[in-house]
Image (cartoon, coloured by chain):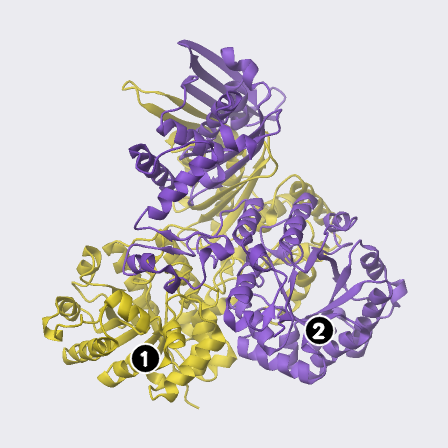
Chain colours: A purple, B yellow
């Protein structure tokens, strides 16, 4: 039996940009479009060219290789012809494969927000779609407020959808703009649209999560006949977010209720990259991945000690709704480190460190890593710090230098001209071969001053760290309040082009930064001695 | 028309306890049970007496006034009589109104986990229920793995449900233990159970969120006929969590698809306490509330400047799926550099600041906001800093105090015992009515020290800021390297329960934090004078 294709349309860069607290730069947008394109989505909506400088610049080039690159914008205004509408012109000129027009389909909003007649709005939809198609673009129409509009005036909402379809739109997308529609209503209304003559394989669904049902509404729409789903990475979006593609994709692929009838562009091989995609996106947003996220969360396949844990180990399939490895995630049974041990051995082997399964030092390392992760360290994102910790615990690392201490001072005062002046100064004392070296430096901030002072004079090692550069610096507060624990991640590089990550954790942001800086320098010294094996090669 | 009652069963203290990272003490359990009882839920499941010392102590007393207090535990073992089973005895002795038995209903698990015959398991269910009823307790039976069990062997799964019902269980709860069942399957299977003779008003649903559909599955079950929903506060629970009662309750109450047919114990008056309940629970867990949570999140009724914002202000009802005040939440229209003049005027109006469209000060404010946002400020996430900036620019803010300067010092050294010691000390000089007040404090880190020193002595204003509390602290590095720009966001609150956000931006993380701290204090002083109109009133 051939399966019908469900098309996946990503709006992370457009509706996702409406998330409170999220603002993408052009560089962010380029990275995200590349992630989405490489993962294999069908459509990547990039933004609203003409509405702001970021989106306009982003649409100077086509940003995807395989996915259709989509520009979003309004239909033409009432009272001007399609060829005389500057908004429509800039949409058509954007370097996109497709244009997604947003159109009002609730008569109340036509009157209040557009200030035109119902008929004029239908004409705007038809003429905009025709202009896009004539310019060689694929046309989509987002019917804004479709479900609420349908409840208020079904005839007019249907007329909007039908007009878009008949004018040549490849997709008519039914939007639950306010996010309050319930799954049974979604089903019933879509069945009415299809009965009216717009075929399901030209219909899309755009759901919001205001009642926690954006995923369920999208699937209810597929059941009712639609064949395109719009959503975002990790469900970001306006208010409570959009439908989460990271949840929908594996559900469509792995749940028999759907996989027997449907397929998407994400096959089993691509699906294994799901957890990495989700985490890479959070990394780009500089936020911690949600532990309880379906499929990809650290807890999604975790079981606490209790009635389930031992049964789970006997036969995981009867306690897991899907195999964790199918989405690139891992099983985690917190009562036993059996799974952990072989993971550790493999992680060490990849770094050129061989350790026997029964070596008591391995037990100690696992214990230390667990304790440190419980206190806030995250070795997943800090390969170099993990390797240093492993080598220290297994006893194969020389002590290049010792730290006697540091002092950092930040002062805000008025200078002699009455201007506010902020000074950051750091003093670092290190000991090399029994000799104390004391360095002082000023910097743009306390961490910069500390970094400059630390690397100012490294005695006999100085020439070895001259090409060390800090490439990135991330700070994460692990729990609320100014008394919180702070985790600092530092990315370093050198003239060889290799990059490595180190981590520091402390109640004190300066001390956390210092730990990560220190680890970076020690890793560099090790690397110079060809001790830091595989990370450099990987 | 009389509406049917949907019973609300909370398992935060039992299944919620299975959340990785969450462990309740007896005191925690007492506080949470009180919250749930006062809010008005029908059932509060407290834990598993006899399984661990916390739960055993917790069941020494009945912990609810109005809600049924429920003890959870296994059915009696096969091969012993009900009166000779010590587990069953300790359940019956617990100071609970009701007992919820967990029973296997998937034949595979009966064999593998219990090691008894299918018939013995049915006998255990029947005898346990009878023993509880004879002891004067209400009996519930959680049919574990019911949906997966039904798919594997429908006859046996149905026999378990029917046996529980016929033995006298008030509720037979169908559990999607692995969390992978889809809404259409939930509907179909429940219809089969009802057809088999177990009436819907004796059926409950226990859903997990492994495909992001615990809420949808619960509602699908209600549609199919069940009349009890089990869930947790904020959806905590094993793996991806349980059905979120904080989302389900308002959906049942406010969405016509349900409210026309059903009612719960949470009427309109109680529903107004929903946001507080959700936030109080997060507070107890010591974590920040999720901004994008349905109904109760800070972003749930937030709109960024853009195509929706100006229309929203014309008629909020057409852009909000429910009125925010019905669940005790607030509307929030955010300012950002994408906003036009009318957005600004409206944003100011909502804060009680009137300014004319042609006032040159308005142009200046827009200019300043744009420049500051370009340099890294984000006013959309910092309402209070925006209001202060606006009032300063429009010239309507008193100068409560001036800053003469601060000095922060962080030192790492060895103490006299050779242990590493890290000290953070801050000195702050403020001027009030021409008098300089100098304060010094030590803290866990430099920002904590600065916060403590700043608020240590505020002269004549001290009593006004005594109840000011910092609720959250976020740091974002805006571009790579230790020379980067840092943005700090601080969330504050006071005894009135109002929350406000302030922002600081600098190359220097200490200075950025100081700016945000200062804004928070000034906002608090303004708020005390009823100048910060709308945020406090809304």
The correct choice, above or below, for A402 with respect to B359 in the image is above
Task: Give neighbour class at mark 2: few <14, some 14-19, many 20+ (Cα, 10 Å).
Answer: some
The correct choice, above or below, for A365 with respect to B36 in the image is above
Element assignment for label 2: helix
Does residue A296 appear anywhere in the picture? no
User: Which-is-in-front pick, marks 1 and 2?
Assistant: 1
Quarter of the rendering occupied by the N terminus of chain A: bottom right
Element assignment for label 1: helix
Q: Which chain is home to disc 2? A: A
Where is residue B396? Give x, y as percent. Answer: 61, 46
Between residues A215 and A4, which one lies in front from this camera angle?
A: A4
Query: Disc 1 vs disc 2: Cβ atoms closer than 8 Å?
Result: no
Q: Measure how far apart labels 1 and 2 are at the Cα level.
A: 43 Å
Between residues B342 and A493, which one lies in front from this camera angle?
A: A493
Q: Quadrant of residue B97?
A: bottom left
Between residues B189 and B213, which one lies in front from this camera angle?
A: B189
Does residue A197 appear anywhere in the picture? yes
The correct choice, above or below, for A418 with respect to A74 in the image is above
Residue positioned 41% across, 73% down in the render: B269
Q: Which chain is home to disc 1? A: B
Which residue occupies the extreme left position in the image? B84
Quarter of the rendering occupied by the C terminus of chain A: top right
Q: Are marks 1 and 2 on the same chain?
A: no
The correct choice, above or below, for A175 with respect to B129 in the image is above
Q: Which mark is residue A202?
A: 2
Q: Residue A146 vs residue B162: left or right?
A: right
User: Which residue lies under the disc numbered 1?
Assistant: B156
Where is residue A379? Give x, y as percent. Answer: 44, 38
Where is residue A387? Give x, y as percent. Answer: 44, 32
């Amino acid at each position: 039996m051939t399966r019908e294709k469900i098309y996946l349309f990503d709006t992370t860069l457009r509706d996702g940009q409406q998330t409170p607290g999220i603002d993408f730069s052009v560089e962010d947008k380029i990275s995200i479009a590349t992630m989405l394109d490489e993962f294999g989505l069908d459509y990547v909506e990039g933004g609203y060219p003409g509405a702001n400088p970021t989106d306009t610049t982003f649409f100077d080039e086509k940003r995807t290789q395989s996915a259709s690159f989509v520009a979003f914008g309004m239909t033409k205004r009432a009272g001007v012809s399609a060829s005389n509408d500057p908004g429509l012109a800039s949409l058509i000129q954007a370097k996109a494969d497709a244009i997604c027009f947003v159109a009002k389909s609730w008569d109340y909003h036509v009157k209040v927000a557009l200030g035109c007649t119902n008929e004029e709005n239908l004409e705007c939809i038809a003429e905009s779609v025709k202009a896009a198609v004539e310019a060689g673009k694929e046309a989509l129409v987002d019917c804004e407020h479709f479900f609420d509009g349908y409840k208020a005036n079904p005839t007019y909402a249907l007329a909007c959808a039908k007009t878009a379809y008949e004018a040549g739109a490849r997709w008519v997308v039914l939007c639950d703009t306010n996010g309050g529609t319930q799954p049974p209503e979604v089903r019933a209304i879509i069945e009415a649209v299809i009965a009216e003559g717009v075929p399901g394989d030209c219909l899309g669904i755009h759901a919001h999560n205001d009642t926690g049902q954006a995923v369920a509404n999208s699937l209810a729409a597929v059941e009712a006949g639609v064949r395109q789903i719009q959503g975002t990475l990790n469900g970001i979006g306006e208010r409570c977010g959009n439908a989460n593609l990271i949840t929908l994709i594996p559900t469509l692929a792995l749940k028999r209720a759907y996989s027997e009838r449907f397929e998407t562009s994400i096959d089993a091989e691509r699906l294994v990259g799901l957890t990495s995609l989700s985490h890479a996106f959070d990394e780009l947003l500089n936020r911690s991945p949600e532990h309880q996220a379906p499929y990809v969360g650290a807890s999604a396949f975790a079981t606490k000690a209790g009635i389930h844990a031992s049964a789970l180990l006997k036969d995981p399939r009867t306690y897991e709704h899907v195999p964790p490895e199918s989405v690139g995630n891992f099983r985690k049974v917190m009562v036993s480190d059996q799974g952990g041990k072989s993971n550790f051995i493999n992680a060490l082997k990849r770094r050129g460190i061989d350790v026997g399964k029964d070596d008591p030092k391995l037990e100690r390392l696992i214990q230390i890593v667990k304790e440190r992760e419980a206190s806030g360290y995250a070795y997943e994102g800090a390969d170099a710090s993990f390797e240093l910790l492993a080598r220290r615990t297994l006893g194969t690392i020389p002590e290049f230098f010792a730290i006697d201490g540091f002092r950092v001072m930040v002062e805000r005062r008025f200078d002699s001209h009455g201007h506010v002046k902020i000074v950051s100064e750091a003093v670092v004392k290190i000991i090399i071969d029994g000799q104390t070296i004391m360095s002082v430096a000023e910097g743009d901030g306390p961490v910069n001053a500390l970094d400059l002072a630390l690397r100012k004079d490294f005695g006999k090692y100085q020439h070895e760290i001259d090409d060390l550069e800090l490439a990135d610096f991330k700070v994460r507060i692990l729990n609320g309040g100014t008394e919180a624990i702070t985790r600092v991640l530092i990315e370093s590089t050198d003239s060889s082009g290799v990059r490595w990550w180190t981590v520091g954790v402390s109640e004190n942001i300066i001390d956390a930064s210092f730990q990560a800086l220190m680890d970076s320098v020690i890793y560099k010294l090790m690397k110079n001695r060809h001790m830091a094996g595989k990370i450099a090669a990987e």
